[in-house]
Amino acid sequence: MHRHKKITDSLKNSPLADFKVGVDNVIFSVDTAQNRLMVLLVMRHDEPFLDQWCLPGTLVRHGESLEDAAYRILAEKIKVENLYLEQLYTFGDPGRDPRESPSSFGVRYLSVSYFALVRFADAQLIANGVSGIAWYPVKQVPQLAFDHNEILEYGYRRLRNKLEYSPIAFEVLPEVFTLSDLYQLYATVLGENFSDYSNFRTRLLKLGFLSDTGLKASRGAGRPASLYRFDAEAFAPLKDKPLVFI
Amino acid sequence: MHRHKKITDSLKNSPLADFKVGVDNVIFSVDTAQNRLMVLLVMRHDEPFLDQWCLPGTLVRHGESLEDAAYRILAEKIKVENLYLEQLYTFGDPGRDPRESPSSFGVRYLSVSYFALVRFADAQLIANGVSGIAWYPVKQVPQLAFDHNEILEYGYRRLRNKLEYSPIAFEVLPEVFTLSDLYQLYATVLGENFSDYSNFRTRLLKLGFLSDTGLKASRGAGRPASLYRFDAEAFAPLKDKPLVFI
């Protein structure tokens, strides 16, 4: 965890860098029908990286906040009911954008990344102004433009983290769900070995914010499964307490 | 948690903003002798906010990464053995710096903030190039320049979070410590009511990465207390598991 850095004294006297600031969104969704974690990609129709896939992004305009730029690009790409964005990380190494020539004293490009998780069934893609737009399975994402594979990796870490420590799963599940649906969602994001079903079930029920609706779902062979809903009121007192969900 | 944002369509066609990018460090330390959480402030010796306290920061230079700028400013302000910085959050609302005039089509100032926790006894302040430098008790921080009170508040949240979910406390405690030292550190940062001592003690010992050194500390009246050390090897298998420390 400890790190030392040599400080280049010469830098102290070099001129200030000029920046354009971009916002790039890592928008995840879970395709619950096929148990796949998806990420939204768009195809670039400009140089650099013409015709390559990248995260949906934009450059920040006069008078626009970073968050407004993130919501703007999101609203341009998908229609979705509920939508929650949070800032992820800022990438700003020199040379991360080929528009900065290596020897240049010119403009640098900074990317402030944002993270979102949307309900797959609700999200409608908008194809305006891009040559392509697609939900890609995270496991099959191609080489992306710029350092976007790195940004995606960072977002994926944040998503796993949020599943472990926050009730974010209930924002993408339907209103009522079986414990097996919930388990499947966790397994899709965290991998099959994150916990066995019976431990997961016991733990989640013990936390006390899943209410049995009394309804049953019957799917396939087995006996009908109980349908639960997330009880926000029961969760409220836990909200600011440190808590592990798995 | 859900938020909707109106998108101002007019912004889509307004020109790209130009930015200077600053790095501001929230450097915390715990004065264990007096049980106070401290933050490092410097006094500005330039306009704007001449003679006001602020977080130590700098503007990013040609060829310099954000992280290098953060380490550069830190190395200019304190000498410290072990030092760990992580990115905190990026603040970029229009108008956050008075050098952007409100109606201006001019340059905006973005702040990428970094977070550090250093050992109080080890950290030596360096007073070069500032009119003042001081460890301020977090509870007595004055009005700071720019939006630095907001950045500090964000850093304080991150610090509490890290104490709850990570072994960061052991980076600022001495090599060997009593459970009461550890409790006091947590109470100093999280407030007295975060847990009672006996629960805290039981929980931490159960996690299995505190080794009893066999040594005793005798301070004040009571009977001598056992001295523990953090066992990094015992902690290793827990490193990537979701875990709550309190």
Image (cartoon, coloured by chain):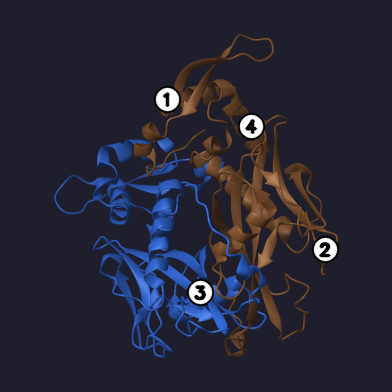
Chain colours: A blue, B brown
Between tags 2 and 4, which lies in front? 2
> Which numbered disc, 2 or 4, marks the residue that appears first in the sequence?
2
Between tags 3 and 4, which lies in front? 3
Residue A80: image location, x then y, percent: 45, 72
Q: Which residue is mark 1?
A: B206
Label 3 is found on which chain of the structure?
A: A
Q: Type of residue at label 4?
A: Ala
Which residue lies at the image location 25% right of the left edge and 69% below the top edge?
A140
Q: CA distance from mark 1 to mark 4?
A: 20 Å
> Which numbered disc, 1 or 4, marks the residue that appears first in the sequence?
4
Whether labels 2 and 4 share one chain = yes
Residue A70: image location, x then y, percent: 53, 73
Mark 1 Cα within 10 Å, few/some/many (few <14, many 20+)?
few
Residue B175: image location, x then y, percent: 53, 30
> For the residue labelled by badge 1, is the local secondary structure a helix, a strand or a loop?
helix
> For the residue labelled by badge 3, is the local secondary structure a helix, a strand or a loop?
loop
Q: Type of residue at label 2?
A: His
> Which numbered disc, 1 or 2, marks the residue that appears first in the sequence?
2
Q: Which residue is mark 3?
A: A94
Q: Which residue is mark 4?
A: B187
Mark 4 Cα within 10 Å, few/some/many (few <14, many 20+)?
some
